[in-house]
Image: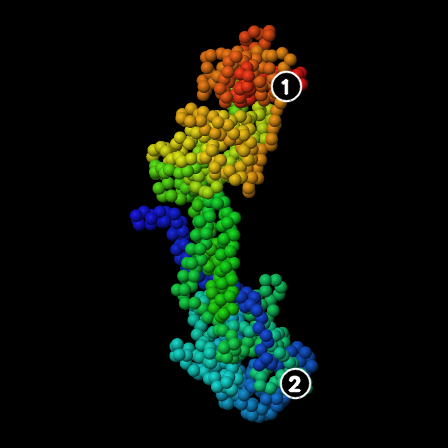
Amino acid sequence: MWKKIIKNLAWKWRAVLFTVPSITVLLIGINCTGSLQIFELAAFDQLIRLRPQKPADQRFLIVGFTESDIQTLGMTILSDELLAKLIENLKKYQPAAIGLDIYRDLPEEPGYEKLVKVFESTPNLIGIKKVVGNQNDSPINPSPILDKLNQVAANDVPMDADSKIRRFFLYLTDKEGKIVPSLGLKLAKIYLEKFNIFPQPAVVNSEYLQLGEAIFIPFEKNHGAYVKTNAEGYQAILNYRHPENTFQQLSVSDVLNNQISPELVRDRIILIGSVAESKNDLFLTPYSSKIIGIPEKMSGVEIHANITSMIISSALGEINLIKIWPEYLEWLWIFSWSALGTSVSWKWRYYGGFSRFSGESIIALFAANAGLICISYYGFLWGLWIPIIPPLLAICLSAIAITAFVAKTAGYIREVFSRYLTDEIVANLLENPDGLNLDCQRRKVTILISDIRGFSAISERSEPEIIFAMLNIYLARMTEIINEYGGTIDEFIGDAILVIFGAPTQKKDDAERAVACAVAMQMGIYDVNAKLKELNLPEIQMGIGINTGEVVVGNIGGNKRSKYGVVGSNINLASRIESYTLGGQILISENTLEAVSSIVKIVEQKSVKIKGFAEAITIYQVGGIAGKYNLFLPLTSEKCVALSEAVPIQFAVLEGKEVSEQLMSGSFVKVSANCAEVKSDYLVDSMSNLEIHLLTGNLQKEKMDYIYAKVTGGKEDKSGFYIHFTAVSPEVENILQTWVITNS
């Protein structure tokens, strides 16, 4: 049993079982090459840009050397004298720390001696040195005075391949092997001392730096979206607090002229540096990743302010550091989204056809992508950098792979066999590994049988090409309607159609859909006749019989050839009921009526004795169906006109397709275009089918083409009966019209 269940599941989800691991391995391989790094970093930038903006960090003040300062002071580099004055003016308001993001490895006279004294008297002043350098700059030494006082930090920042700053250094090792803290870390340590927070080894790993509540996990060469990246030094992902021009800022001239409020300086971290474009100390950041517009750059001093702010805020528990998943979780993440994308595409692949996405599939895939982005976004708000690009590709590639798989393996089958079987049956054969076995099952279904009235007579008078043209127009329109209501076309039998509701897929409203389908088919005959009239082809009428009951359904035949079919007495009963219909009528059995009684409109009922059934049954003529379908046939009534002179006829009863050899005489006493009153000494059972020939006065007893009719009832005085024409020849049709006009 379990073996069969596993076999069925494996077959049912065969493409999923193949596609998911394949797509996962493919994307992991691509990701490991670094091909997706640039796209994932771009997604990282958008997460930075889209998250809610934090209020400006009031613990910081930037003193910027602006273009205006250059013009006002008439110099591109601050002299030692002006720099000393600048620091002195700030010192008197008691800042928490001063970060000097200006190189002072060489004197800038005048005023060097004065600057030395200021450096020596300012213990909370931190100068900079460039430890590593890059392809454009070589290492730059610090101020020898500050270096001697151990008041020097590194202002190096690692740059990604796209020249953006997304990481920062906590520590660097210079060429002499000395560990140099970054400017941001050095300033943060000074500020955090008043909170009794000092750097220490982390409890979870003694090699990790812990500062207050923050544990800084070192950046590695394969860190998150990064692949084979230079991870020298102690690096971490920079969780920017602000975009450019957000920190409070004063110009150098403002400070030199004492145009400064003490509250802006007291107990704050002051960062002094260049913000002028001409100084070329501007860098690309995640905030530069605008979809539209020119990328804006951030000054180096603002980047150091962001670094310092991040370290302090994380140590105090105000913000989260950006963390990543271990590599195995990233792989599982890709696998999960590949499984989701594949399953959704595979589940709904037949709803929109074999070679295209269905509406349900598109909506589900869109929802999956939106869900992935939302999860990544909200995870990022909590400090977790969740991969976006590989899972997005996993969803899309999985959907494409499933579409290609289905198109290749089943597209041709669908195209060919859907002409002979319904989409549901084809899908059932493809879905079930035992779809071609001969197992049958009992099932309650609703059977609909339709037939064109008098089509045999039309066929006898028409060329085969005309018959095919008529049938194709008729069957094409009827097939559209049947498919719309979810019926399974079991067979075309000439001009007759056998439709099943409830197999291979059973639904609660099978009977309702069958009746609604029948009404829609009768209404669709108007479209068919309109096309036939355009082609000068004879118009047609159709009768429909419906019955509900238990039958045996399944594949019938052998290994070489089989068909999906139904067998049972209820099929025969539906066929018998259909044989009693007139053109435009829908007759249903009592079993069907019970299933649809609450919404069906019955216009007439009658009791009939059916061959092969011991007792008479009641059949019901449908006038429409309410509820969600709301379909109703137009009410028609036709009045026969009395003929001034009775027209002699001869008629014979049809037994199936055989015409009785017994000819009986009578006459038309009343006629219309579709019915007549017959006077005859020979009484015929109601619902009998007749073949009638007119006898003219000049052509005594000579047949003048045909009339086929059904007996609708007998006259109360037993003098004759009423008939409804089911087919008449064009010659007779003209004669009938003449009689109606003449006698009206």
Sooner in the amino-acid sequence: mark 2 or mark 1 = 2
Q: Amino acid at mark 2?
A: Ser
Could you tell me residue 439's position as x and y percent? 34, 38
Q: Quadrant of the C terminus?
A: top right
Quarter of the view holding residue 505: top left
Residue 295 vertical placement versus 156 (above, below): above
Residue appearing at x 58%, y 22% in the figure: 674
Mark number displayed over residue 261: 2
Q: Is residue 179 visible?
A: yes
Residue 395 vertical placement versus 83 (above, below): above
Q: Is residue 524 visible?
A: no
Near-viewer residue (350 or 399): 350
Q: Amino acid at mark 1?
A: Val
**SS at mark 1?**
strand
Residue 264 vertical placement versus 337 (above, below): below
Residue 378 vertical placement versus 417 (above, below): below
Packing grade of label 1 (10 A; few <14, some 14-19, many >=20) is: some
Identify the residue under disc 1: 641
Near-viewer residue (739 or 385): 739
Could you tell me residue 588's position as x and y percent? 49, 32
**SS at mark 2?**
loop
